[in-house]
Amino acid sequence: MNTPTSMHRTARPGSRHRHRHQRGVVLAMSLVLLAILSLVALYAMRGSILGEQVSKNIRANEVATQAAETALRYCEDRVRTAQALTIIDAPVTLTPGELPDQWQTRANWFDNAVSNEIPADQLVAANMRPLPVRPRCIVERFTLPPAPGEDRRAVAFMQPHLITAIGFSADYERDASNRAISGGETWLQSILIP
């Protein structure tokens, strides 16, 4: 007769302790891996936010540049077709190579006796958000000084116009002295001889 023999496993000494130790190592490794993944996710999010800010700044710069371009073309067209526009006559005492400088005075830009604000209907496009500050231009007419030894009458008929335009971004704000607090501005210039 065969009697069933019972099989009992006998634990080797120390194996139970090793099994618990291995579970502790797995937990520690999991925590380290979780910390590394959290740091990677944090840096990825930070990079994404930085990319978004750069993208926003590029867009704001493009809006300001397009507004300045619109102002410059508007004022050039008004000068070319002799339509109503505020034009400053520069002093006749300009030296060769010198240009009018009224556009460099910050207070002139928001003085309607000196600068020209572009009408809102020139800036509207379909679904376009209105700009809080409309672009402006300053037009300065001057007489070319004669070259050394040249008769003044030889260039007196030429009346060039220095046209300076400024455009503002959608988030532009200014202080009491007309300096930018936030947002951006773009400046463009041309010389037009009508």
Image: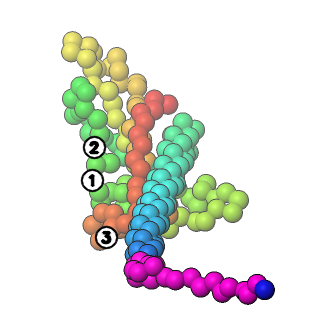
User: Judging from the image, what secondary structure is the residue with disc 2 in?
Assistant: loop
- The amino acid pointed to by label 2 is Asp
Query: Which quadrant is home to the N terminus?
Result: bottom right
- Secondary structure character of the magenta stretch overall: loop
User: Judging from the image, what secondary structure is the residue with disc 1 in?
Assistant: loop
The residue to which callout 1 is attached is 105
- The amino acid pointed to by label 3 is Asp
Q: Within 10 Å of the Cα at label 2, are there few (<14), some (14-19), or many (20+) other Cα atoms?
A: few
The CA distance from mark 3 to mark 2 is 23 Å
The residue to which callout 3 is attached is 175
Residue 101's label in the rendered image is: 2
Q: Nearer the viewer, residue 91 or 123?
A: 123
The CA distance from mark 1 to mark 2 is 8 Å
88 in the magenta segment: no
Region rendered in magenta:
2-21
Q: Residue furthest front?
A: 1
Residue 127 coordinates in the image, percent (x, y): 69, 63
